[in-house]
Amino acid sequence: MNEYKILFTGTMGAGKTTAIGSVSETPPIVTDVANTDASVAKERTTVGLDFGQFTLDNGDRVRLFGTPGQGRFDFLWKILAKNALGLIILTDNSRPDPLADLAVYLDGFAEDLATLPCVIGVGRRDSHPVPSLDDYAAVLAQRELLVPVIDVDVRRRDDVVLLIDTLLAQLEASLYEEETP
Amino acid sequence: MTSLPESTKALALQQAQRLLFDVAGLTAVVVATADGFDVASAVQSQIEPSRIAAMASSISAISEVVSQEARLGRGKCVTIDTEAGFAVLHAVHRADVPLVINVIANEDAILGQVTYRAAQLARTLAAA
């Protein structure tokens, strides 16, 4: 049985805690507190970490960690990224500039992205279709990053499983490449 | 979204400065919201209150989860003991805006004294 550590990061309010809660088989560990940031209409916000566990069909276990979204917690981003096998970045398309939000995490995790597989999950596209997934892909291409971008509703378990599966598929492909002479 | 009354912020600043002045070996006293914004601080060295505030909130939230998991009741205080001093984080259980007091001390400070004074300040700010 293999164990994987996957890290969820992204904008405050994009649904990192919800995503982990959607798929975790054990009650998720949540470190949210009352939000006092008036610029974001949100009751509570994660200030430590989220944690959940998920078992794949083949019995492999995935440990899911979530970071706080705000940049003032970037010291935790580095701690939580240690030993992670992949990164899922969630964005919220209803925010004023989701592509700028994405850039914060592409910069914040630049060192990790050089070696780790990544998936971008774009939320609230039903009500806010712009920027399009192609716009996201263009931003990633400018940085020479080949990263899948997926339309998700993290309240739906299947959508979160799709994010995890997409990440693991990249991981398996990279392992295959390493093994192939 | 509730914000901290200005009178409480003023009291927190006055008390932070007093604590830093009163107790030998303290290098910083930062009062932060539970979500990591500094609301009052008194610092002696090149410590950045906003960074301390964010870290205090993370540590406090993680320790709260540990105390819940272990059924130890509501978290009150965390001590980080180091080679060159220590940091004490004390929760302030306010109904409107929960706070965290973070006191950073060098090796000249006495842990018991700092813990006592941090708890005293927590009670003062909880009642303000």
Image: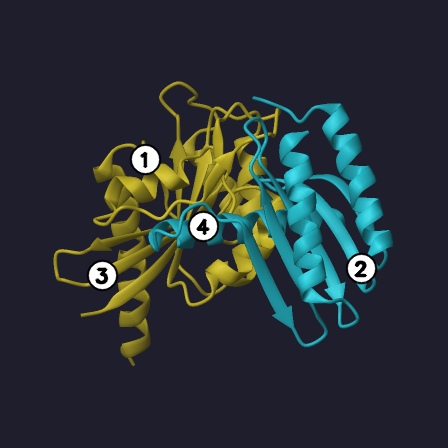
Chain colours: A yellow, B cyan
The answer to whether residue A101 of the structure is visible from this angle is: yes
Q: Secondary structure at mark 4?
A: loop
Q: Which callout, 3 or 4, points at the residue further toward the start of the chain?
A: 4
Q: Position of residue A14 (x, y in %)?
A: 44, 34
Please report the residue visible at 48 percent of the width from the left and 26 percent of the height from the top.
Answer: A43
**Chain bearing mark 2:** B
Q: Residue lying farthest bottom?
A: A181
Q: Which callout, 1 or 3, points at the residue further toward the start of the chain?
A: 3
**Chain bearing mark 4:** A
Q: Amino acid at mark 1?
A: Val
B34 or B96, nearer to the observer = B96
Please report the residue visible at 68 percent of the width from the left and 65 percent of the height from the top.
Answer: B111
Lateral position of residue B57 relative to residue B40, left or right? left
Q: Which residue bears the numbered disc 3?
A: A61
Q: Nearer the viewer, mark 4 or mark 1?
A: 4
Mark 2–mark 4 distance (CA, rounded to whole Å): 28 Å
| Quadrant in which the N terminus of chain B appears | top right
Is disc 3 in contact with disc 4, using a CB cutoff of under 8 Å? no
Q: Which residue bears the numbered disc 1?
A: A154
Q: Amino acid at mark 2?
A: Thr
Q: Estimate how packed mark 3 is, as few (under 14), some (14 to 19) or many (20 or more) residues with alpha carbons within 10 Å.
A: some
Q: Amino acid at mark 3?
A: Arg
Q: Secondary structure at mark 2?
A: strand
Mark 3–mark 2 distance (CA, rounded to whole Å): 45 Å
Q: Which callout, 4 or 1, points at the residue further toward the start of the chain?
A: 4
Residue B17 versus residue A7 in the image, above or below: above
| Quadrant in which the C terminus of chain B appears | top right
**Chain bearing mark 1:** A
Q: Which residue bears the numbered disc 4?
A: A49
Tell me, yes or no, whether dots 3 and 4 are on the same chain.
Answer: yes
Q: Which residue bears the numbered disc 2?
A: B27
